[in-house]
Amino acid sequence: MLILKKFRGAVNRKLLSSPRKRGSRCGFTLTPAFAGAGSAGMMTAVLASVMILSSRPGQAGETRTACQLDESYNGPHQEAFQKLRFYIPNLLSTTQLELASDMGLDYQEGFRYPFTIGFVDEPLSGSEYALAYVQLSRGDGGFRQRMNINLEAYSRRPFNFDKVFRHEMSHAILSDAVGGDVFAKLPVWLIEGLAIWVAEQGEQLTRAEAHRYPAYAEKILVSDLEGPRRANLYPQYFLAIEYIVKTKGVGSLQNLLHDLVNERPLREAMAYNLGEDWETFQKNVRDFSIQYIRNLGTGSPLEREQPY
């Protein structure tokens, strides 16, 4: 959660034709940080390089900035902190490569605006996940983002950290791509559905929600994509993306994202990339969602993963 033209270029063609790449092209360099009494000896991890890339057509030569890992945490959950401070750099590198491939956006090597990952001891009220959330700010220094990892939650509850990290990173990438709060520029169903899809949370989430309402799953979970945002509509958001992928292909989803990031109107971008007007798209998503839920069956109820 954030607190917050068809592209046929060489980068997109490469991403569409290549499998996910494992490994790292982005390393961290540790440098001392002396932030005052109590923080002596702490280190700030900074990605070493600044890259010149183009994330959008027409922006060649754009400077990319390194993600920073803020290691100034001195709270009570030192065991969790020490584990994650060494784990996150490699996870970040791998996640950037994989999300760049999944989303069709040029985010293999850095961000357009400052992005920091840090550690806290409590969630933000109303945040999507207790484990992690992205905060946006804009001041004299311009637009920037910070992903906070809640070590209190990490220490007490069984999270799939990698999935939540991927989910939140997709929000950060989209906000970076549009240069501000992505929820102010793109529809919620697309933002959240995409995040669930890239994090591979969709089937488990939909199954868990369907088992909560065994007699009314279709009525409760299948809804208008433009209706009020509700937590139990996350399966519907995911299923809209799943519909696009299964019926139009990943390339169509990537081209749609690219157009929307470049401020093409939603209806126009959908007609061009998906070959459907909005009304037809909603009807087809609804039919697809109903069939998907029915195919899940009525097996044993599953506990919702925390977070799912």
Image: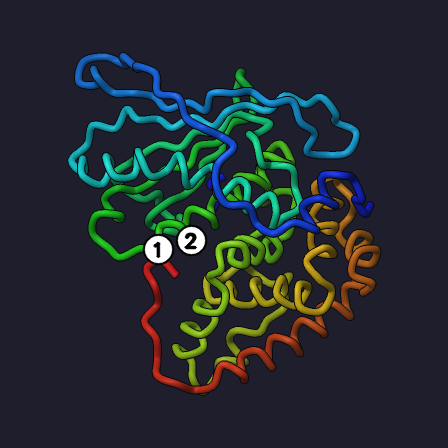
The secondary element bearing badge 1 is classed as loop
**Residue at 79% from the left image edge and 52% from the top image edge:** 269
**Residue at 39% from the left image edge and 21% from the top image edge:** 29
**Residue at 67% from the left image edge and 71% from the top image edge:** 285
Is 205 located above or below residue 8 in the figure? Answer: below
Q: CA distance from mark 2 to mark 1?
A: 6 Å
Residue assigned mark 1: 160
Is 281 located above or below residue 198 in the figure? Answer: below
Locate residue 159 relative to residue 254 in the image: left or right.
left
All told, the count of numbered labels is: 2
The part of the image, by quadrant, that contains residue 302 is bottom left
- Residue 23 lies, in percent from the top left, at 48, 41
Query: Do the CB atoms of the residues marked 2 and 1 lie less than 8 Å apart?
Result: yes
Is 73 located above or below residue 132 in the figure? Answer: above
In this orientation, which residue lies closer to the viewer: 188 or 301?
Answer: 301
Q: Mark 2 belongs to which amino acid?
A: Lys
Crowding around mark 2 (Cα neighbors within 10 Å: few <14, some 14 to 19, many 20+) is: some
Q: Mark 1 belongs to which amino acid?
A: Asn
The secondary element bearing badge 2 is classed as helix
In this orientation, which residue lies closer to the viewer: 34 or 185?
Answer: 34
Residue assigned mark 2: 163
